[in-house]
Image (cartoon, coloured by chain):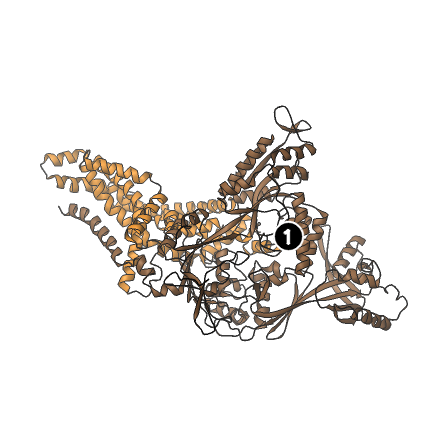
Chain colours: A orange, B brown
């Protein structure tokens, strides 16, 4: 176990090193310059541009830039080129904004997918099964932004309540309960939107996993013993069907830093996805690279966690 | 079965809990109609967040817009785009012209120095434009200069013997002063000055280098325009400290400090020095003639006491940062600025909103609105929804959205010409674009009226030259090139391009063939690309088109001059200085005259426009330049687009009459199309008022 952990961590550090090189190279190879050194602004003379390049170390050779950047990052000293704010503080602030969206979205996804998937599998071929299949593919296929607009227009027209932003603008004087509920309401629509695709996909997995388990010999045995149907489905079948999903918890970790650009833009949500998008558009290298690095770290941590979880829930697996 | 119950119960519970929250949220009606606070609050929607709320650092439009409300400059432009005093109550522009007496003037040979000075004093003193004449005797100066020869740099000492210098203070700037003076001193008096004669280098250099270095060290004539600003008394920053000439000087120093990386540096590079004789007087002396100078002082003034070295050192110490590298760019001031404009900073939540409050001690009287809220809503459709609901008062409305709102009695719509234009530029280094007849013919083949009608939905106007259409510099008598494909063919035939039996346009057996490119992501430019291609194909030209991603487009195509023809646009300021875009010295790689336009008479006009301080004369020069460019057709000037804006009809201008009673006026755009010019007088009423007029 210990040796597995040690080996795994060393491997992951090596991977991380290569990721850092590749992402650094990709960002610098991408065409375009940071907006501060935009050559098409008649206000910027070549001297000003040159001064910016020097201040950003863009005049150094790439490997020196690489060392300077990751040196700063590891010491937590990187600052955004756009507004000179420390990058880590910026990311933390956005992370806290994106977190509720992620939590509520995941909560909805997981709580809805399981009953749906299990029921669809238990009543295989029934009307419910067919309807869920159809709706699932419908939601997987519909473009997210289009569905978002439909939802917003619908809610605004019917209920006449605001939906965009993290809270109703100008509500700072209201009592605390109102403010809390207002916050929750603003979470609902974007989370539902974020959860639809998740539910559609995850309920399909659950269904097929259940079906696979249900066709196993031990289920037939359980039925033959004369156990009640619910007992067979929920105790014997579901428990075993759950196994692969436990590992998915681990793989959810990188989602923490993802955030959806489209949902966050349409709903004016000041989250991570939007920050990343804007940083890319402005070629704000420190922000892009830090986010990239952090998400690489999270992906690697996620796989590690999922390996360990798998080992814990499935005694057949020894690492 | 418990598990089953949990499994089914959980989603119902979660959804129920979440959805009940809607009952607690105020509806739009509660927020807008029933809320008296909403009437004294102006909320605007923006696609992007601000980055640095500091006028000397702001480079994006959101930051500049907010900085414009928080900070105030010395001057700005009035309804007619003339300069008007803000922090400066008034100003004078004069000139100190100086020249060297390197040899006796005509008719004064053999005169003693004293007599010569006497003679000059008398002669020049009688000129009406001359205020004062000062003469200083010759002197000697030692300096070291850097010489780079064959790749190596070294320092060389030099002894300069400067001849006696005459300083003439002129009542107004006159770029032709020295030409006039040559009438007195003898023709060619200044051009015959040989700087290398007055310089003695400590080691031997080749004559050309000597001449060049000497020319940099000493020159026969110098123009030093001087602007003297007189500041208004009693103006305060938002924190209550007075605005003085020290703050103006500080702002200038902050811009010029390389550590701050201010993008406004080039505007102030021509400043030689700034003097502050007292708290309310600022004297700006310039190195050379630079007529855009006055306009640069619309730059917002920073409070010296919050950003000077001690303040920065204190902040750096507090935040545990290295004071050596800590500059204004790093300061927290940029996120909670203090200025002296009509609104003071209140709160900023990144990517959510920025809130400004009215500054009650604003020198021109406080604005009517108590609060200015800048909401960041990065999606156009969401902005429109919020606008309909009444939670934002203005947003970046699109032409097709204006169409939807036009008939609605709840709203008032505005539109006007923007500062800028769209054009097709031709790479004049390449065939067939060297010939102006070809360029003109290509322009004649395109039906711009159709582009305006179908591509821009009428939201544009034709333009014939490089100046903004709403300024005086634009010559409205110049006719746009007519749409005339036959005429185009005739013109091409004059240039040697004939149609062969297959309808191909041929010269010396070669068909005319080129590629028209533009950047991707701009649908209007893409449409123009297709229209131009089709029009030109009908003449028998083999036109290919291509759209290229912006960064590649600029770096690989435009900057490396690797293009035939290009659809692009310029956005411009009011000042008529066109040096960077049209002067022949700006045709090198990465420079902005990428079409390679070179015309000696245009060059001369461009330089003279830059140096002319008199508005009427400048207008005259600009119109001549406009005519040359319209004749040469380095670009096919297509159109200037219109901006659009929509407001609630209940927003009006409120002023007080002599008895202090409110008088309401409808919001009308100024002559130049600025509808928000009287923003400080705007207010929102509970009902649409009935206007008396």
Query: In the rendered view, would you say B663 is above or below B588?
Result: below
Query: In the rendered view, would you say A43 is above or below A238?
Result: below
Query: In the rendered view, would you say B257 is above or below B565?
Result: below
**Residue A195: % across, % down:** 30, 46
Q: Where on the picture, by quarter, is residue B422?
A: top right
- Report the residue marked by disc 1: B578
Q: On the picture, is A74 further left or further right than A143?
A: right
Tell which of A279 and B601 is nearer to you: B601
**Residue B635: % across, % down:** 62, 43
Q: Is residue B358 visible?
A: yes
Task: Identify the chain of the residue marked 1, using the numbered disc in the image.
Answer: B
Q: Is residue B563 visible?
A: no
Tell which of B557 and B73 is nearer to you: B73
Q: Residues within 10 Å of mark 1 (few under 14, many from 20)?
A: many
In what element is the residue under mark 1? loop
Query: In the rendered view, would you say A17 is above or below A137?
Result: below
The quarter of the picture where the N terminus of chain B appears is top left
Tell which of B63 and A120 is nearer to you: B63
Residue farthest left in this picture: A226
Q: Residue at x 51, y 74 (%)?
A: B241
**Residue B452: % across, % down:** 52, 43
Residue farthest right in this picture: B110
Q: On the picture, is B160 further left or further right than A196?
A: right
Residue farthest top in this picture: B501
Tell which of A34 and B267 is nearer to you: B267
Q: On the picture, is B633 further left or further right than A250?
A: right
**Residue A136: % across, % down:** 27, 39
């Amino acid at each position: 176990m210990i040796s597995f952990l040690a080996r795994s961590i060393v491997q992951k550090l090596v991977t991380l090193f290569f990721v850092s090189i590749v992402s650094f190279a990709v960002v610098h190879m991408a065409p375009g310059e940071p907006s501060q050194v935009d050559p098409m602004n008649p206000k910027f003379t070549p001297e000003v541009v040159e001064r910016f390049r020097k201040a950003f170390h863009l005049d150094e050779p790439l490997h020196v830039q690489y060392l300077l950047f990751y040196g700063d990052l590891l010491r937590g000293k990187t600052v955004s080129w756009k507004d000179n704010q420390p990058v880590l503080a910026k990311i933390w602030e956005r992370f806290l904004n994106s977190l509720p969206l992620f939590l509520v979205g995941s909560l909805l996804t997981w709580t809805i997918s399981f009953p749906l998937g299990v029921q669809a599998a238990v009543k295989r071929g029934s009307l419910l099964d067919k309807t869920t299949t159809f709706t699932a593919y419908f939601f997987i296929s519909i473009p997210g932004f289009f569905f978002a607009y439909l939802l917003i227009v619908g809610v605004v027209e019917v209920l006449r309540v605001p939906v965009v932003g993290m809270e109703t603008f100008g509500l700072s004087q209201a009592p605390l309960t109102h403010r809390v509920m207002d916050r929750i309401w603003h979470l609902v629509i974007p989370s539902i939107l974020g959860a639809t695709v998740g539910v559609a996909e995850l309920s399909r997995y659950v269904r097929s996993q259940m079906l696979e388990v249900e066709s196993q010999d031990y289920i037939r045995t359980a039925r033959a013993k004369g156990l009640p149907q619910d007992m067979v489905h929920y105790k014997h079948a579901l428990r075993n069907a759950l196994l692969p999903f436990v590992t998915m918890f681990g793989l959810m970790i990188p989602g923490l830093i993802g955030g959806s650009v489209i949902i966050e833009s349409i709903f004016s949500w000041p989250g991570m996805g939007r920050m990343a998008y804007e940083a890319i558009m402005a070629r704000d290298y420190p922000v892009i690279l830090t986010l990239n690095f952090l998400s690489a770290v999270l992906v690697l941590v996620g796989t590690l966690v999922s390996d360990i979880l798998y080992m814990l829930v499935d005694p057949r697996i020894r690492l | 079965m418990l598990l089953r119950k949990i499994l089914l119960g959980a989603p119902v519970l979660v959804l129920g809990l979440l959805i009940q929250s809607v009952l607690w949220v105020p509806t739009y009606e509660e927020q807008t109609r029933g809320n008296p606070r909403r009437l004294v609050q102006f909320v605007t929607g923006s696609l992007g967040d601000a980055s640095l709320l500091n006028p000397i650092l702001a480079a994006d439009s959101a930051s500049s817009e907010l900085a414009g409300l928080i900070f105030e400059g010395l001057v700005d432009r009035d309804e007619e785009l003339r300069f008007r005093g803000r922090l400066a109550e008034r100003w004078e522009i004069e000139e100190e012209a100086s020249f060297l007496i390197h040899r006796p003037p005509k008719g004064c040979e053999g005169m003693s120095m004293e007599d010569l000075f006497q003679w000059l004093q008398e002669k020049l003193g009688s000129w009406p434009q001359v205020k004062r004449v000062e003469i200083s005797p010759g002197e000697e100066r030692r300096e070291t200069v850097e010489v780079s020869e064959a790749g190596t740099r070294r320092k060389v000492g030099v002894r300069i013997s400067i001849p006696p210098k005459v300083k003439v203070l002129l009542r107004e700037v006159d770029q032709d002063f020295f030409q006039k003076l040559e009438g007195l001193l003898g023709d060619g008096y200044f051009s015959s000055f040989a700087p290398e004669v007055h310089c003695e280098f400590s080691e031997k250099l080749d004559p050309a280098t000597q001449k060049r270095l000497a020319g940099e060290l000493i020159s026969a004539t110098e123009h030093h325009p001087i602007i003297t600003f007189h500041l208004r008394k009693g103006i305060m920053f938002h924190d209550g400290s007075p605005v003085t000439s020290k703050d103006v000087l500080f702002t200038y120093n902050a811009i010029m400090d390389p550590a701050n990386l201010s993008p406004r540096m080039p505007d102030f590079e021509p400043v030689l020095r700034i003097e502050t004789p007292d708290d309310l007087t600022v004297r700006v002396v310039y190195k050379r003639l630079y007529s855009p100078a006055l306009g640069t002082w619309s730059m917002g003034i920073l409070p010296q006491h919050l950003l000077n070295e001690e303040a920065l050192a204190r902040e750096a110490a507090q935040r545990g940062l290295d004071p050596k590298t800590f500059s204004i760019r790093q300061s927290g001031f940029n996120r909670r600025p203090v200025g002296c404009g009509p609104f003071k900073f209140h709160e900023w939540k990144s990517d959510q909103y920025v809130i400004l409050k009215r500054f009650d001690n604003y020198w021109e009287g406080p604005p009517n609105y108590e609060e200015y809220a800048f909401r960041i809503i990065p999606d156009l459709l969401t902005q429109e929804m919020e606008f309909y609901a009444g939670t934002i008062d203005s947003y970046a409305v699109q032409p097709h959205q204006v169409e939807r709102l036009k008939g609605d009695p709840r709203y008032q719509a505005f539109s006007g010409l923007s500062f800028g234009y769209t054009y097709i530029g031709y790479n004049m280094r390449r065939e067939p674009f060297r010939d102006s007849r070809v360029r003109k013919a290509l322009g004649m083949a395109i039906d711009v009226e159709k582009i305006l009608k179908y591509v821009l939905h009428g939201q544009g106007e034709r333009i014939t030259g490089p100046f903004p259409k709403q300024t005086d510099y634009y010559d409205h008598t110049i006719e746009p090139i007519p749409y005339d494909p036959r005429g185009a063919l005739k013109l091409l035939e004059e240039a040697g391009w004939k149609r062969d039996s297959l309808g191909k346009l041929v010269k010396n057996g070669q068909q005319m063939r080129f590629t028209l490119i533009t950047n991707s992501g701009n649908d209007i430019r893409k449409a123009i690309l297709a229209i131009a291609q089709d029009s030109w194909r009908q003449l028998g030209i083999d036109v290919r088109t291509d759209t290229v991603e912006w960064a590649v487009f600029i770096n690989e195509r435009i900057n490396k001059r690797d293009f035939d023809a290009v659809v692009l646009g310029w956005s411009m300021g009011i000042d008529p200085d066109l040096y960077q875009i049209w002067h022949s010295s700006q045709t090198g790689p990465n420079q902005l005259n990428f079409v390679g336009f070179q015309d000696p008479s245009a060059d001369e006009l461009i330089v003279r426009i830059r140096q002319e301080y008199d508005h009427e004369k400048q207008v005259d020069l600009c119109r001549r330049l406009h005519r040359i460019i319209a004749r040469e057709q380095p670009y096919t000037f297509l159109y200037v687009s219109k901006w659009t804006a929509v407001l609630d009809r209940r927003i009006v201008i409120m002023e007080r009459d002599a008895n202090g009673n409110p008088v309401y006026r409808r919001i009308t755009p100024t002559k130049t199309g600025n509808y928000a010019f009287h923003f400080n007088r705007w207010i929102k009423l509970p009902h649409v008022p009935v206007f008396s007029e």
